[in-house]
Image (spheres, rainbow, N blue to C red):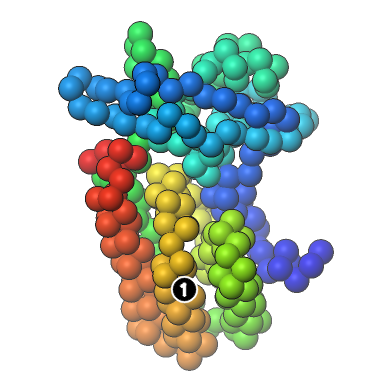
Amino acid sequence: MNQAAADIGPGARRSIALAVGHVTMSAVFSFNHRGPTSRTRGSRDFGVPLTYAAWTSTHTARRGVSKAVMVYEELRAGIVSLRLRPGVRIDKGEICTRLGVSRQPLAEALARLAEERLVDVEPQKGTFVARIRLADVAGAAFVRRSVEIATVERIAPTVEKPAIDRLRRILGYQTAAVATEDIEEFYTLDVRFHATLLDQLAMSRVAEIVETSRAQLERARRLLLPTPRRNRDTLEEHEAIIAGLAGHDAAEAGAAMGRHLDRGMSELRKFADRQPELFEA
């Protein structure tokens, strides 16, 4: 195991697996778009690009995992990672064929995704990847902000040097990813940085609460990945968080975390103004 892989606690591993959106299927999925340029609800344009990312993977069956769970995990990963873009129509027949499952496991998977507001089921029209709901993102961001500020304030007085060193190594890897313009690596490391902080809290239930609100927020955050300035700002903001922790200053660490998360949401709102077809109010 290399050093980068070693800098991951159990909570961080789960967060990375779900947030980064590893997709594991042995096929390329093509999902249909309804209409020549957009789909509509009533008179409102629900525009989606005619071309969208193919969904690729190398799926292998896992012992003890039901087909419904497997399909759910595959679709959820594709949605959260934006391999399945907001507004894309899901071709049920294609999924069943490619994954070798019947309609029943797919129906169960889609029901779970609908509960998470990641897909929209429209009678007589089809099932579509949900657009990113700004209200859901704001709610998830509120939960995340509250928990992560409280986390760094809680751990700052007693955090030990090995944990600080681990965060600094992750920041170093992020810096290298920015220099090489490796967007996926940068995102993986960003998830790792924040999950490592939650690991230091040693309250698994708190990490689970954050995880349940993550999906909508992660889709939105991924839209900002190609923004070099935002990525560079993130490096400075992470450094400020580490500085507060290293100085065992709870107030400084909490303030740095608050600035970091608030700036990310501000950038997202600007992006939503520029590309409203990917969002709902």
Residue at numbered disc 1? 232
- Between 245 and 3, which is closer to the camera in this rendering? 3
The answer to which image quadrant residue 135 occupies is: top left
Query: Which amino acid type is shown beneath numbered disc 1?
Result: Arg
Q: Residue at x 68, y 21 (%)?
A: 99
Quadrant assignment, res 130: top left
**Which residue, as the protein is rendered here, is positioned at the far top?**
124
Q: Residue at x 69, y 32 (%)?
A: 25
Asked whether, in this view, residue 49 is left or right of residue 265, the answer is right
| Local SS, label 1 | helix
- Left or right of 261: which side holds 56? right
From where the camera sits, is residue 146 visible? no
- Residue sitting nearer the eye, 216 or 37: 37
Looking at the picture, how far across and down is residue 235, in whole percent?
49, 75
Q: Is residue 196 above or below residue 17?
A: below
Q: Is residue 217 above or below residue 229?
A: above
| Identity of the residue drawn at 55% across and 81% down | 159
Q: Residue furthest right?
A: 1
| Residue 31 point in image, percent of width and height | 52, 24
Identify whether 57 is placed above or below 151: above
Kindly tell me whether residue 176 is visible in this rendering.
yes
The residue at the point 34 percent across, 40 percent down is 278
Q: Is residue 175 left or right of residue 139?
A: right
Q: Position of residue 75 (x, y in %)?
A: 55, 31
Please rate how many residues cluster around mark 1, counting C-alpha atoms within 10 Å: few if below 14, some from 14 to 19, many from 20: some
Q: Quadrant of the N terminus?
A: bottom right
